[in-house]
Amino acid sequence: MYKKIFIAWFLCACCMMRAEAGDFNASLFGIKSNGVTLNTRAIQKAIDHISETGGGTLHFYVGRYLTGTIVLKSNVTVHLHEGAILLGSTNPHDYDMVGGTLTFVGAYRAENIAVVGQGIIDGQGRELAYNFLDQQQKGILPGATIYDRAGYRSKGVYLRECRNVTFRGVTIKNGADWTLMPDQCVDMVVDSVTVIGHAFWNNDGIDIVDCRNFKLLNSFVDAADDAICFKSHDAAAASDNVEVRNCVARSSASAFKFGTVSAGGYKNIRIVNNKVYNTHRSALTIAIPDGGYADNIFVDSLYAYNTSNAIYLRIGDRNTSRPAGSLKNVTIQNMYCEIPAVKADAGYPYEGPVEDNPRNISPASIVGLEGGHDIENITLRNITLVYPGGGNPHYARRGTTPAELDAIPEMEQSYPEFSQFIELPAWAFWIRHAKHIVFENVTFKAGARDYRPAIVIQESDGVTLKNVVCDEPGGKKKQVHTYKSTNITQQ
């Protein structure tokens, strides 16, 4: 009887030992949590050991774990428990290339990797970036400075060509450069993550680069530059089957942005039930300036407050070695946006630049390119855009005469930005070089009378305005102006 009980207990204990065999405390490898000891080699040894022995989880408990670059390896989960801080060294020489990019936390061609928990990855990016600048100015580190600011510096988290990746629960902040950058990753989920990227200038929040089967869910992103940014760096690749859902974004540039680099493309992208606030540029920008394409983009339930522009869709042609790209099959529905009369990101650590003045408040825009590069098949449905109005022709003026409309430059080689044309002839929406555009149940509201009409449709074909309301105080005027356009329908 007792022998059978002992055997049963022994087998159970063995099973428990096997189940727990993949769990390792950081202290087992001599990793110190005092915030002073540099743990780079010890942490890397722990990750390598776990990966080489079949995989498992490396646990960090309460403490500050100072380190330089660490590289995640296949079948390893890093669990940052509440109160655990993975703290970046402020010495630029503690950072290495991973997958061709200088980074704090990196991975290259790894599979089944995860970073989970309620802990923090803190790159100490402001001090680190200034130390990079110091070393560049002394000629010790490579890279030119830009506006006397460090151009060469380390990313916060960079993952290249990885598969089956999970980031859940953690906070990633204070990268010296872009904060979280998955590049050509497949089957990746970022869920309930906080990303704070305003330790230095040009700090994006999360850059989703040519990834497939990617989900960003239930997360908060606050960035000095673009917050949630889709990029395509490889002409042979694309961001494909990407979903962003239930997120909040704040930016001193754009909140949701496709581009600027569009070497390959973007397709099958869903952006659903997200909020934007205090954003200097656009709530949503889709820019194709380098060839490439955007196709089958679906945006639903986007709510933006104190954001300087609602929508900017743009084809450019700054890469003269290849044909201009394409932008088509985009649906934007159930959107609400409030545009302020003042600077939306005033007071943040790195504000967006005051530029392209004098100009009145710019409208949302759909702007293709002359020469047959129209933006095609765009549907805007159930949308309300609230503007301050008050455009003053004595401050800056663009009228609707043929000469004034013809004088708006193409600017095909310029950086694509909603304010790039300076003064525009509409207070709510400007459309040029587009075809098959549908507005359905769209309301534009102006807080004060504006000298411009609400909508200008220029050099376009097949635009349908169905139940479009232009609410502007101060009397009635013609709110839709068309020029060199055909098949314009108002219902």
Image: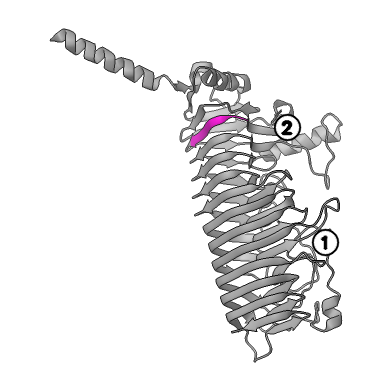
Disc 2, SS: loop
Name the residue at 64% across, 67% down.
Answer: 377
Label 2 CA crowd tier, 10 Å (few <14, some 14–19, many 20+): few
Q: Is residue 48 above or below residue 180?
A: above
Q: Is residue 230 left or right of residue 170?
A: right
Q: Residue furthest top?
A: 3
Residue that numbered label 1 is attached to: 412
- Numbered mark located on residue 12 in the image: none
Residues drawn in magenta: 109-116
Scheme of colours in the image: one colour
Q: Is residue 210 left or right of residue 217?
A: right
Q: Position of residue 398 (x, y in %)?
A: 80, 78
Looking at the image, which is closer to me, 155 or 130?
Answer: 155
Name the residue at 54% across, 48% down.
Answer: 216
Residue that numbered label 2 is attached to: 100
Q: Is residue 421 magenta?
A: no
Going by the numbered disc 1, the residue's amino acid type is Glu
Q: Which quadrant holds residue 17? A: top left
Q: Position of residue 151 (x, y in %)?
A: 79, 41
Q: Which quadrant holds residue 465? A: bottom right
Looking at the image, which is closer to me, 104 or 440?
Answer: 440
Disc 1, SS: loop
Q: Is residue 164 left or right of residue 367?
A: left
Name the residue at 15% across, 9% down.
Answer: 2
